Amino acid sequence: MVDALLGDWKLVSSENFEDLMKELGVGLVMRKLGNTTKPNVKFVKSGDEWTFSTVSTLKSQHLKYKLDEEFDEETLDGRKVKTTFHWDGNKLVQTQKDKDNNVVCTITREITDSGELKCVATAGKVESIRMYHKEQ
């Protein structure tokens, strides 16, 4: 799974993302902008350190982390969260704990049988699914 995840991915579909942002407390203007943006993501691994990049016309972010180690993250929408990445079987799970509004967002990424990257984000009772194709 690790090798399949590495590289560049382009967003091709998004379901329920605006509702997820609303559940996370993201303001109306940022939700509208975020819902129309089609980011590319990239995973790089060097030793035991990972870099996860999100690049769009609106904003970009580069997270450096080690698995199972909590770190401070400022999300693209400006929330300050404590984040941890870990493997759960063949899924990379990211947990964001927002201390300001007590919301936890869990983002699970896995490679589907067709080779797509499926990203399922859950906060409260809201779930969003975003699909990515690997860039060649």
Image: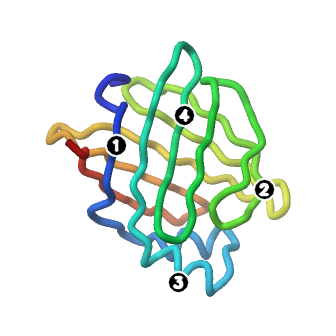
In front: 133, or 87? 133
- Of the two numbered discs 2 and 3 on the same chain, state the one appearing first in sequence: 3
Q: Residue at x 53, y 13 (%)?
A: 47
Residue 51's label in the rendered image is 4
- Of the two numbered discs 4 and 2 on the same chain, state the one appearing first in sequence: 4
Quarter containing the C terminus: top left
Q: Would you call the spot at circle 3 few (<14 residues within 10 Å), some (14-19), or many (20 or more)?
A: few
CB within 8 Å, label 1 to label 4 = no
For residue 21, what is the image quadrant? Answer: bottom right
CB within 8 Å, label 4 to label 2 = no
Q: Is residue 43 left or right of residue 5?
A: right
For residue 66, what is the image quadrant? Answer: top right
Q: Which residue is mark 1?
A: 8
Residue 11, position as x, y percentages in the image? 33, 59
Residue 80's label in the rendered image is 2
Disc 1 versus disc 3: nearer the observer: 1
